[in-house]
Amino acid sequence: MSKRVLIVEDEIFVALEIEQIVEETGFDVSAIAADRPAALACAESCDIALVDLNLRDGPTGPIIGMELASRYGIRVIYVTANPSQIGEASVAALGVITKPFRSQSISAALQLAAAEEPELHAAEIAGFIPFLQSGSSSGLVSRG
């Protein structure tokens, strides 16, 4: 079964570009959300979320990422030009892809997030900065 991806991005052209990459990688896009209420409304139908930090309702991406991981067990990957703004919310995510991104970075990060037990091979994913330490499960919330 294909994993379902939530794209949390308020810039429509960026969101559509990410959607195309997600689908070309073989995943289904459950929804595109531009703010916190929309993201949380779609959360129950998602397995993975690609989350920008600065959205239509302000810099809510880190809060959204933490909620998606803790309340819904979604594997979160931040996609942002401002990774320093993630702060403590990094504990809820697998890592961050820096903008401007390469399609290969998003594709590889999605495959990592879809794995039953993600092994981080950061050097193999250009543009991806992992938050998990190899052999550690911190940052992952098990789905129950």
Image (tube, rainbow, N blue to C red):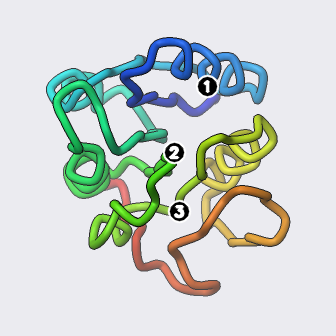
Say the numbered circle drawn on residue 95.
3
Say the numbered circle drawn on residue 18.
1
**Residue 22 in picture, x, y percent from top left:** 66, 26
Q: Is residue 38 above or below residue 93?
A: above
Q: Quadrant of the N terminus?
A: top right
Image marks 2 and 1: residues in contact by CB distance under 8 Å: yes
Q: Earlier in the sequence, mark 3 or mark 1?
A: 1
Q: Quadrant of the C terminus?
A: bottom left
Determine the residue positioned at 55% across, 13% down. Answer: 13
The alpha-carbon separation of the residues under discs 3 and 1 comes to 17 Å
The alpha-carbon separation of the residues under discs 2 and 1 comes to 10 Å
**Dot 1: within a 10 Å radius of its alpha carbon, few (fewer than 14), some, or many (20 or more) residues?**
many
Foreground residue among 31 and 97:
97
The type of residue carrying mark 3 is Gly
**Dot 2: within a 10 Å radius of its alpha carbon, few (fewer than 14), some, or many (20 or more) residues?**
many
**Location of residue 88 (image quadrant):** bottom left
Asked whether, in this view, residue 109 is left or right of residue 12, the answer is right
Determine the residue positioned at 41% across, 18% down. Answer: 32
Q: Secondary structure at mark 3?
A: strand
Residue named by callout 2:
79
**Residue 87 in picture, x, y percent from top left:** 31, 70
Foreground residue among 86 and 22:
86
Say the numbered circle drawn on residue 43.
none
The type of residue carrying mark 1 is Ile
**Location of residue 16 (image quadrant):** top right
